[in-house]
Amino acid sequence: MYYIYHIPGKKIGVTRNLNNRVTLMQGYKETEYEVLEQSEDINYISDREIELQKSYGYKVDMKLYKNLKFNKMKINATEQTSTFPCPVNKLKGRLMDNIGLKWKHPEFGQFEITKKNIPWIMKNVKTSMFNNDRCYIYNKAFYEAYYNVDHTPDVDMLLMMADNEVTDTSERFDLIRDWAATRGLYDSGNSHTQYVKLQEEAGELAKALLINDQPEIVDAIGDMVVVLTNLAHLQGYSIEYCIDEAYKVIAARTGKMINGTFVKDAD
């Protein structure tokens, strides 16, 4: 069955899986979109989608739905870039359709499309200057973000992944642990190096606070949370457990503010 869905004020599209395409991929709940028509006739649905896009005043797709290629993407990897055979506005759907697809780079080895790296690709993809129907990412940036074991993860990406994939805040920490585990940090790293990393990030935070650099403040705090999550894991604890234990101590604590600092009452 093919469905023509309408996201009011945004778009009209076609899918065979409303939950995957509209809810999981685009983030709209069932109450935020409507199904205009449905049919098993792909020819009818393809023509009708264009008619409705015109009728509602939305951007009209250049290709009929029936002419779109949902088969395996052919990603062209050069030394500098990996190019996808579709425009940016169609890329997320193609990536979701091709999760698990792998391609090779002569220097960085094997890349793979995963549910967790799709947000990074979508944030960093650029339209080809030679063909608007193609787009690309830089291979080194992709490698540094997802394959270099010595690289600190992009905290914005971790949060974006969490926003796209989880509803439980605690699962954000699972994303961090998954990132670290797949890069061998828990197998080859240790608590001492993570502590040194924590002090480096604390220094970055201090510099950002001194000059009131808000983006760097956010970045440094996020990096420290990432490091603390990994440090706790290496010590045999979860960061959630450490936070809960700390909160148990401070929950009933009383005191007062003195010169901008909370000073607890004497026991």
Image (tube, rainbow, N blue to C red):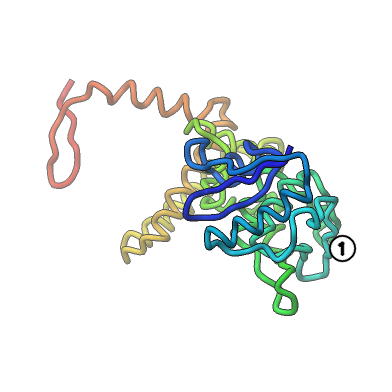
Query: Residue pushed farthest bottom?
Result: 130
Residue at the (81%, 57%) spot, across then down: 67
Answer few, some or many: residues within 10 Å of disc 1's Cα (few below 14, many 20 plus, some between 14 and 19): few
Q: Residue at image x 19%, y 37%?
A: 262
Image position of 56 with respect to 78: above or below: above
Q: Position of residue 255 (x, y in %)?
A: 15, 30
Q: Is residue 217 left or right of residue 160?
A: left
Dot 1 amino acid type: Pro
Q: Check disc 1 and report its element: helix, strand or loop.
A: loop
The number of discs equals 1
- Looking at the image, residue 228 lies above or below residue 98: above
Q: Which image quarter is the C terminus in?
A: top left
x, y (%) of residue 228? 50, 39
- In this rendering, position of residue 243 left or right of residue 146: left
Foreground pick, 256 / 23? 23
| Residue 13 image offset from top left, x and y in percent | 63, 51
Residue 109, position in %: x, y? 83, 56
**Is residue 184 at least partly visible in the picture?**
no
Name the residue at 52% across, 42% down.
33
Q: Residue at x 59, y 58 (%)?
A: 53
| Residue 107 in sight from this viewpoint | yes
Q: Quadrant of the N terminus?
A: top right
Q: Which residue is mark 1?
A: 106
